[in-house]
Image (spheres, rainbow, N blue to C red):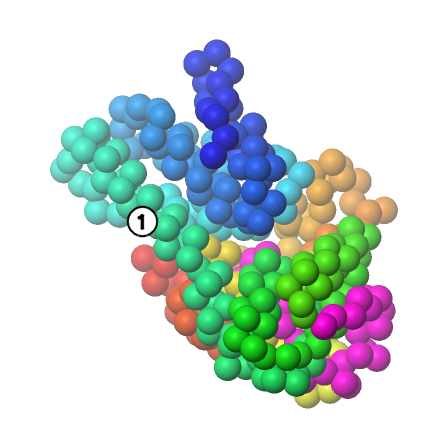
Amino acid sequence: MPEIVEKGEEFDVVTYFLQLLDNDKDMSSGIAAIKTLLMILEKKQFGTIHILHTTMREAVAAMRNTDLSIAAIVSAGELFCRFITLSLDDKHMEECRQIMLHRGKIFLTKLNNSRQVIAQQAQRFICDGGRILTHSRSRVVLKALITASKNKKSFHVYVTQGGTENSGDEMIKDLKAAGIECTLILDSATGYVMESVDFVMVGAEAVVESGGIINRIGSYTMGLCAREMKKPFYVLAESFKFSRLYPLNQRDLPNEYKYSRKHLNDVAKVHPLVDYTPPAYITLLFTDLGILTPSAVSDELIKLYM
C-alpha cells in the first residue's frame, strides 16, 4: 500500500491512484479507483452526505483525467458510491462514515475475490486438449487459464498481439511461465486461426447495459469471425465493470473511452484503443455474479444500481 501523498493538507488523489497501479501491476484500474475512494473516506471528514458525494465525484473525475482506460474507473466509482451510501437516513454523519467504511471494505474484499470466482466458473468450459483463442492480455482470462493448467488440463492458447501496444507479448510470457502451450499471432490472423480453435475467451474493459462489451480494439472483429465460423465467444469480466452505457454502434462510444486523454482534441488521425462488441456476437459472460447470457446483463445492472 503506498503512503498517503498530500499537497499541503489535500490528499493527492491521482498520485495515490497511480502509485497503487505502479506498485501492483496485476491490479485493475477499477480496483485501484475503489481503494483510492476508500482511502479518501478514511482520511477525510465530511459535514454532510452531499459533500461526500461531491468529493467522491471530484475524485473519480481526477482519476478519469489520467491516460488510463476510464471505463472501469467510472463504473467502479459509481458502484462503490452507490453501495456505501444506501439507507443512511436519520444518522449522525460520523456514524454514517463508519458504516460507509465498513461497507466499502466488504465491497472491496468481495471484488478482490472476483477473479478467482470467475476462473472457477470457466473451468468446465476449458477441456483437456482444447484450443483457445484470446485477444491481447486479460488478467482474468490469464487467471482462468492458469487455474485450468493447475487442474492438470493440457490445452493450447493462441494470443493476438493486441494492437500497437503488443500486450499479447506479455500474455505469452505469463502463459509460458505457467507452463501453458501458446502461440503469438498477428491480430490480422484471427480469421485464419479461428477455424482451428474450439472457442474464443476474452476479457472486457466494460460490460454495457445491452450485454455487449467494450474491450481492446480488435475484439469486435474477433466476435464477427467467431459467429461466422460458429465458435463460442466467451467474455470474462468482473461485476465492477458493469456500466450504465447503451451504445448501438462504434460511434456511440464516448471519445474519452476510445482515445487517450492527450489525443482527445484531435481524434481524426488517431487509432482508437477500444471497440464495442454487440451482444449478438457474445455467447456467455462469466462474472462474479454468475454465468450470464448477454440479455441477463440489464437485469443484473438494475440489481446493482437499485
Q: Quadrant of residue 222?
A: bottom right
- Extreme residue toward the top, this view: 8
**Helix, strand or loop at mark 1:** helix
Q: Is residue 242 visible?
A: no
Which residue is at the front of the view, 89 or 151?
151
Q: Residues within 10 Å of mark 1 (few under 14, many from 20)?
A: few
Q: Is residue 87 visible?
A: yes
- Extreme residue toward the left, this view: 90
Residue at numbered disc 1: 106
- Which percent across, then down, holds residue 3? 48, 26
Residue 274: say if magenta.
no
At 63% from the left and 68% from the top, the residue drawn is 202
At 37% from the left and 55% from the top, the residue drawn is 110
Q: Is residue 33 above or below residue 167?
A: above
- Which percent across, then down, holds residue 165? 78, 51
In the shown orientation, is residue 286 left or right of residue 177?
left
- Which percent across, then down, holds residue 160? 77, 66
Looking at the rendering, the stretch of residues picked out in magenta corresponds to 181-208
Amino acid at circle 1: Ile
Which residue is at the front of the view, 193 or 88?
193
Residue 194: say if magenta.
yes
